Image: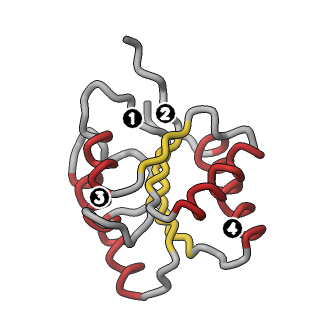
Amino acid sequence: MVQQAVDILLVEDNPDDAELAIRALRKSNLANHLLHLQDGQEALDYLFNEKNTKPKLVLLDLKMPKVDGIEVLRKLKSDERTRTIPVVMLTSSKEERDIVETYKLGVNAYIVKPLDFEQFGTAVAQLGLFWLVLNQTPQ
């Protein structure tokens, strides 16, 4: 069986935020190869399964059940196989310690979710365009 390529891995436990992000990416024609997972353990299982393709971008929530976003980020950036995958924290946390900790671990960007639905959709679409279309990554 041929594994479907995944461009964006969305790791988000809030179904409303996930749906909004997916809609925004669809509207920008960036959701064709998107996989939505609901917690950090699912993300780690996917990312470290050798049968799966590596995504071009991980949109990662910070506060999740089972394994939080900081631990997912720590494991991704400390492993040679996944270190170069761009990771964008997409979270409601404005806590300085969360921002500092994620940057120390190697996050590529930290975006605080706008409370306004339209702003949130615009932010996600712009993230997708930048990381999938404009940004150059190692092959």
> Which mark sits nearer the N-terminus, 2 or 4?
2
Q: For the point 58% across and 64% down, which residue is it?
A: 17
- Crowd class of label 3 (few under 14; some 14 to 19; many from 20; radius 10 Å): many
> Which mark sits nearer the N-terminus, 3 or 1?
1
Q: For the point 40% across and 45% down, which residue is it?
A: 85
Q: Position of residue 56 (x, y in %)?
A: 49, 40
- Crowd class of label 4 (few under 14; some 14 to 19; many from 20; radius 10 Å): some
Q: Secondary structure at mark 1?
A: loop
Q: Which mark is residue 54?
A: 1
Q: Which residue is disc 4 drawn over?
A: 120
Q: Position of residue 84 (x, y in %)?
A: 37, 45
> Which mark sits nearer the N-terminus, 4 or 3?
3
Q: Which residue is disc 3 drawn over?
A: 72
Residue 11 placement, left or right of 43: right
How far apart are the alpha carbons under marks 1 and 2? 7 Å
Look at label 1 and name its amino acid.
Answer: Lys
Seen from this angle, which residue lies furthest bottom? Answer: 96
Q: For the point 32% across and 60% down, which residue is it?
A: 73
Look at label 2 and name its amino acid.
Answer: Val
